[in-house]
Image (cartoon, rainbow, N blue to C red):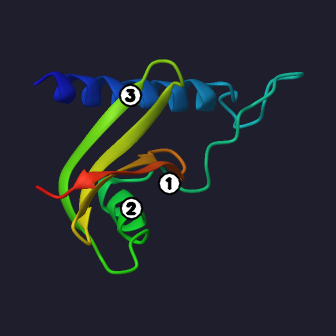
Amino acid sequence: MHSITKAVFGVLAFSLCLTLALAAATHAGEPAAGAQVATPPKSGPVDFETASEIALKLFENGGQITEMDMDFDLESGKVEYKFEIDSDGFEYEVNIDAATGRVLKFEREGPSK
């Protein structure tokens, strides 16, 4: 249940950041004089499906996702998708940045169970 709470908090925090960036523009869509407006990403945040495709592309011989989770890292302020993947008899942990789709972690943990 704790990971669900963290996931919900992460999504809400990410949404709040995007809302605040967009709120910097005036009602006419023009920035106020001297204001710096953050440009939102050209595509929206990466969803679970896209993140899982990115993670599985790391494995030449294919892989099987055994666990998926979403986490908000308070230190970095990033929302991450975390995958446990079995491939070639080993278990791997792969973390994907939910905003950019960048691989943050790719680590072999040990033999598959």
Residue 52 relative to residue 23: left or right: left
Instruction: First in sequence, mark 3 or 2: give its number.
Output: 2
Which residue is drawn at the image coordinates 67% and 25% (left, top)?
24
- Secondary structure category for the residue under label 1: loop
- Residue under label 3: 72
- Secondary structure category for the residue under label 3: strand
Is residue 12 positioned above or below 69 on the image? Answer: above
- Residue under label 2: 55
- Image quadrant where one finds the C terminus: bottom left
Which residue is drawn at the image coordinates 49% and 51% (left, top)?
44
Residue furthest toward the top? Answer: 74
Residue 13, located in which quarter of the rendered image? top left
- Residue under label 1: 101
Q: As shown in the figure, which amino acid type bears the numbered disc 1?
A: Gly
Q: As shown in the figure, which amino acid type bears the numbered disc 3?
A: Phe
68 vs 92, nearest the viewer: 92
Residue furthest toward the front? Answer: 111
